[in-house]
Amino acid sequence: LAANECWRRCSHESLPNRIHPRPISAEDSMLPEDPVRAFQLCYCGWLILSMLTSSSQYQLFYTWFHSSGIGLASKRGLGAHPSKLYGIITPPALTPLQMRAVGVAFTACLLASLAPLAPRPFLFGAFALSLLYFPQLYAEATLSGHNPILVPAVLLLLACAPSLDAAASPPSPPPPPWPLQLLRVYLASGYVSSGVAKVLCSFRFRRYWGLGTSLQHYFLEGMWSRPADSALTRSVQWRL
């Protein structure tokens, strides 16, 4: 009887929690309440993981690339066709030893930015070091194109976020997440302008913008891996 009474009371008391579970509060979450700080922790943590797992491969490639003697080895910049930083500054060519030191310092700045004490100076340091590190690897297969271009821009926006100054003692309520909104605008404008440029260049050079092998690969991959439900949409895809 005592066991049955105990079971009845426990079941009765836990029933409301099963029907209406208690919402997760800021204290229960592993991430801070400030969305900018939460994004910064996730983004920098992912960059650190990527550097720890891939930097040795980058170093092997750069050691060969630096002494290969090919024409591309004399260029430095961001993008598949290496461009000057912000169209003004030509990145210097680093030696393999300097390249390793910059990679270690870049990872260390990212790691230090995870601490609640003054993350913004370390983010700015990581931004400056990224402008030295990634332009050396523009010819590496996994870092070519637009992949590394976003890293310096995101780090600079985070370094300018005033809410990160209060990472050690976050205010209540948290400040507005304008850096994340600006980041969305930056990403959207970058990819939209890229698409508009392809269409405009087709008129400028009198060549259809969809004839490029890379674009054809994207279209065919999307059509085969994610076919549209509408017959009209599939017809437009094939005509493009």
Image (tube, rainbow, N blue to C red):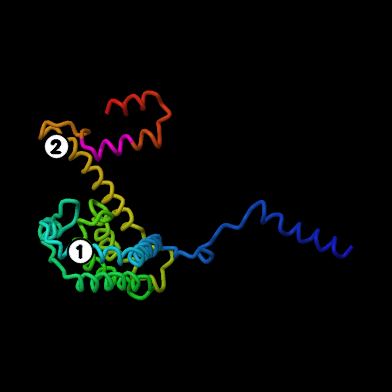
Secondary structure, mark 1, is helix
Q: Residue at x 51, y 63 (%)?
A: 29
Q: Amino acid at mark 1?
A: Trp
Q: Secondary structure at mark 2?
A: helix
Pair 2/1: label in front = 1
Residue at (24%, 71%) from the top-left corner?
A: 100
Image quadrant where residue 231 sits: top left
Q: Could you tell whether 129 is left or right of 22 in the image?
A: left
Q: Position of residue 137 (x, y in %)?
A: 21, 60
**Does 89 sit above or below residue 225?**
below
Secondary structure mostly seen in magenta is helix
Q: Splitting the image into 4 quarters, where does residue 67 fall?
A: bottom left
Q: Position of residue 83 (x, y in %)?
A: 14, 55
The stretch of residues the image draws in magenta is: 212-220
Give the class, few, some or many, for how many residues have Cα within 10 Å of label 1's Cα (few <14, many ≥20): few
- Between the C-alphas of marks 2 and 1, the distance is 36 Å
The residue identified by callout 2 is 201
Q: Where residue 64 is drawn, which disc sits there?
A: 1
Q: Nearer the viewer, residue 82 or 32?
A: 82
